[in-house]
Image (tube, rainbow, N blue to C red):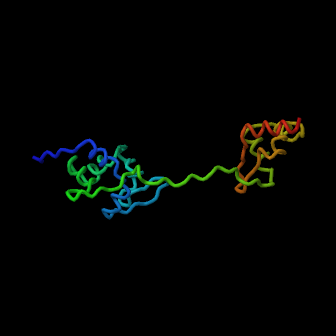
Amino acid sequence: MAQYIHFTDEQKRQAAEVDLEEFLRQRGEKLLPSGRDKRLDRDHSVTIRGCKWFDHDSRQGGNAISFVRWFYNYSYPEAVKALLGGEQGTIYPSAAEREKPPQKPFELPKANTNMRRIFAYLMKHRHIDRDVIAYDDTIVHQMIECVKVYPDGRLDIIFGGGHLIEECLEKEI
């Protein structure tokens, strides 16, 4: 029978918040990028983000302690000791301490001058009659003229926000 090891609440919290990416790298595991997550090289169904993990095959996941118990088949005390660095007291960095990459400011894509895609989209997918789009005095035509609806460089249709439409209509009046 295993020996009882007492862990304080702080030690349990620290172990649960260990950055799994760093922990696995230090143990020689290869991680592959998968969007914001990382995937294990030897088991692609497991994704990791910070101190959380999820196995898409078995539909289970959790924190760092449950991962070490599941992945390495450790008991609870063994998992906590491994995450806290064993007897030496080496502590792996917390996932909360990792810096998040700065978020890019939102910018509307640059406009393309080809309006053919807009007309095709509005007629075929939104079922707007050609006459409603083609006449100069319609709201759709005014929005296109004010560049609030336009194709971007990839020919996706960009719709400006509602406040932009109101500004456009105020200028027309």
The foreground one among 166 and 137 is 166
Q: Quadrant of residue 82?
A: bottom left
Residue 165, given in percent of the width and then of the height, sits at 78, 38
Q: Residue at x 74, y 44 (%)?
A: 121
Q: Quadrant of residue 164?
A: top right
Please say if 163 is above or below 20: above
Which residue occupies the extreme left position in the image?
A: 1
Residue 169, given in percent of the width and then of the height, sits at 83, 36
Q: Quadrant of residue 28?
A: bottom left
Please say if 84 is above or below 132: below
Residue 34, given in percent of the width and then of the height, sits at 47, 56
Q: Examine the rendering and report whether any part of residue 103 can be seen.
A: yes
The foreground one among 4 and 46 is 4
Q: Residue at x 80, y 47 (%)?
A: 147
Residue 21, given in percent of the width and then of the height, sits at 38, 57
Q: Examine the rendering and report whether any part of residue 47 can be seen.
A: no
Q: Residue at x 86, y 36 (%)?
A: 138
> Residue 3 vs residue 72: left or right?
left
